Amino acid sequence: MKALSAPRDRKPDWSRRTTEREVRAWGVVVPTLTIAALTLVITLPWGFDPLLVNVPPLLILMLIFCWTVRCPQLVPAVLVFAVGIAVDVVTASPVGFWAFLFLVGYALAAQIARFAGAWPLAAALLGFPPISVLVAGLSYAIQSGYFARVAPLEPVMASLKIAWFALPAIVIVVAIIDRRMTHSATQAIAEVA
């Protein structure tokens, strides 16, 4: 008489298929992790020249801008606000200063994303310089008003030059990460179907 047991030659299937829901979750996690990692690295005490004090926040804004233009639903406004508060705390700025400026840049990037269509790379390269000028101008005006004196313009101009110089590198890195993420998501969804 045969025992009622599973055949011994059948092994359990330990491989797990990726669901479409998990792929979407990773789609949100990757931009969040890259923005958080850049924020952590940039806000370390590097001992920047006082002339370049606005460069680290502009680089963070650049990454937020690039991810938002490529895929706005992957960058939540709460993340942008939290990163801004973290930068405010680390740079000893008034709380809400960079958070407000990041949210302004994020809102403008979301509007640009609506019109970018199939050209997010060009939209990021052509859209960030005017947005960065606007954000730097707001930063300058708020700083001048906060300290009740005209702030020096040289740090703002130097920071903008460096940010514009770094823009192509950040755009290319985001494009590579997004392309790999999209390729992996397409494979995972095809696997599920």
Image: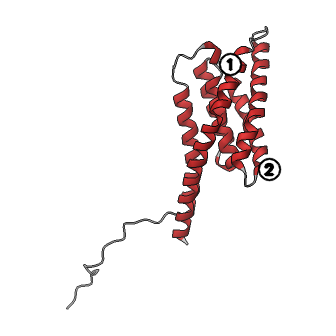
Q: In which quarter of the image is residue 136?
A: top right
Q: Quadrant of residue 185?
A: bottom right
Q: Which amino acid does label 1 sit on?
A: Pro
Above or below — where is 87 with respect to 187?
above
Identify the image's colour scheme: rainbow, by chain, secondary structure or one colour. Answer: secondary structure
Q: Quadrant of residue 104?
A: top right
What SS does tag 1 mark? Answer: loop
* Position of residue 13 in the picture relative to residue 59 (left or right): left
Q: Of label 2 and label 1, which has the lower sequence position?
A: 1
- Quarter of the image where the C terminus is located: bottom right
Separation (CA) of disc 2 from disc 1: 34 Å
User: Residue 58: where, in percent of width, then height?
Assistant: 66, 28
User: Residue 182: where, in percent of width, then height?
Assistant: 58, 57
Which residue corresponds to the image point at 75% horizontal and 11% vertical from the top-left?
151
- The residue most toward the bottom is 1
Which of the labelled discs sits on residue 115, or is there none? Answer: 2
* Position of residue 70 in the picture relative to residue 36 (left or right): right
Which residue is denoted by mark 1 in the rendering?
94
| Residue 127 visible in the snapshot | yes
Disc nearest the viewer among 2 and 1 = 2
Which residue corresponds to the image point at 61% horizontal and 17% vertical from the top-left?
92
Total numbered labels = 2
User: Residue 70: where, in percent of width, then height?
Assistant: 68, 48
